[in-house]
């Protein structure tokens, strides 16, 4: 059982910029008891070693993975785009944005996914205890708020949180026909074909699969921040500009001439 006193977090809102009266201009920094992090590090090593030993994490995931990085992720993305262009294909791509993905993780769903990865019995009960019954309090200018119960999300400021999120999003890549690359909750889909309508159809089917996954697992998509882009040779550019839109949740995605991915662009 994970001790109840270790489940209390103290949130210190860190001002970013803009209007100081606007709550969205603050980044919440959660402080957890030191002993809880010591315990988490022990469990983290055991869980991570188990997952990597038996190759239970998606090979398409680069976030929070040892010896992987945003650089490797971007190199893979660029390689995939160039491979399509070298074959004189039309290349269509989508950058997906989930709304507060880490904070919306469903605890029952996460426990189910842990069980499917072979975490059972007392170990699964430990994770259930770790996730449930958490409380946070906000401190601002020396004033501490009343406790607020947290019943979803991976614990902010925790050691295990990022790895548990990888487990939660791991099955997103299943049944995807396009090339998919993930960096934690940043998702890049790319499809290329000599017939641009085929590339578009493949990607639209995958977008519907992603939408279905997001509904089933309670991780909403932020449609306003999902972007599409088309790459083509200069001689194919006119046709590329006239292609039908990529559609997510019945909403045509805005097409951009350039996009920023993983803070690069």
Image: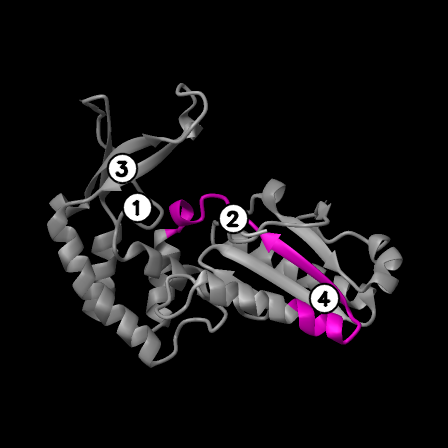
Identify residue for label 4: 202
Let me know if residue 1 appears in the view.
no
**Which of the numbered marks, if any, corresponds to residue 98?**
2
Mark pair 4, 2: CA separation: 21 Å
Give the answer, above or below, for where 227 lies relative to 27. Answer: below
First in sequence: mark 4 or mark 3?
3
Label 3 residue SS: strand
Q: Position of residue 72 (x, y in %)?
A: 48, 67
- On the rendered image, what quadrant is the N terminus found in? bottom left
User: Which residue does the numbered mark 1 point to in the structure image?
Assistant: 156
**Point 54% across, 52% down: residue:** 264
> 10 Å neighbourhood of mark 2: few (<14), some, or many (≥20)?
some
Asked if residue 225 can be seen in this view, the reply is yes
Mark toward the viewer: 1 or 3: 1
Label for residue 149? 3
Which quadrant of the structure image shows residue 46?
Answer: bottom left
Check contact, mark 1 vs mark 4: CB within 8 A.
Answer: no
Left or right: residue 101 compared with residue 33: right
């Amino acid at each position: 059982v994970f001790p109840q006193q270790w489940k209390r977090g103290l949130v210190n809102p860190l001002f970013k910029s803009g209007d100081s009266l606007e709550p969205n201009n603050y980044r919440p920094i959660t402080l957890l008891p030191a002993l809880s992090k010591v315990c988490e590090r022990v469990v983290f090593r055991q869980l991570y070693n188990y997952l990597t030993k038996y190759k239970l994490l998606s090979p398409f995931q680069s976030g929070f993975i040892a010896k992987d990085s945003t650089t490797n992720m971007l190199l893979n993305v660029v390689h995939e785009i160039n491979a399509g262009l070298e074959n004189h294909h039309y290349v269509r791509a989508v950058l997906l944005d989930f709304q507060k993905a880490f904070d919306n993780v469903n605890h029952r769903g996460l426990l189910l996914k842990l069980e499917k990865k072979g975490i059972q019995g007392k170990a699964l009960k430990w994770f259930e205890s770790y996730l449930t019954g958490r409380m946070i309090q906000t401190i601002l200018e020396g004033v501490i708020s009343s406790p607020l119960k947290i019943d979803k999300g991976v614990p902010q400021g925790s050691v295990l949180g990022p790895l548990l999120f990888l487990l939660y999003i791991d099955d997103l890549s299943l049944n995807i026909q396009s090339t998919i690359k993930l960096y934690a909750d940043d998702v890049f889909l790319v499809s290329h074909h000599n017939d641009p309508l085929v590339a578009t159809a493949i990607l639209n089917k995958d977008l519907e699969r992603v939408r279905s996954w997001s509904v089933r697992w309670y991780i909403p998509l932020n449609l306003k921040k999902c972007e599409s882009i088309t790459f083509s040779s200069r001689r194919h550019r006119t046709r590329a500009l006239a292609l039908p839109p990529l559609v997510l949740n019945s909403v045509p995605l805005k097409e951009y001439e350039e996009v920023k991915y993983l803070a690069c662009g």
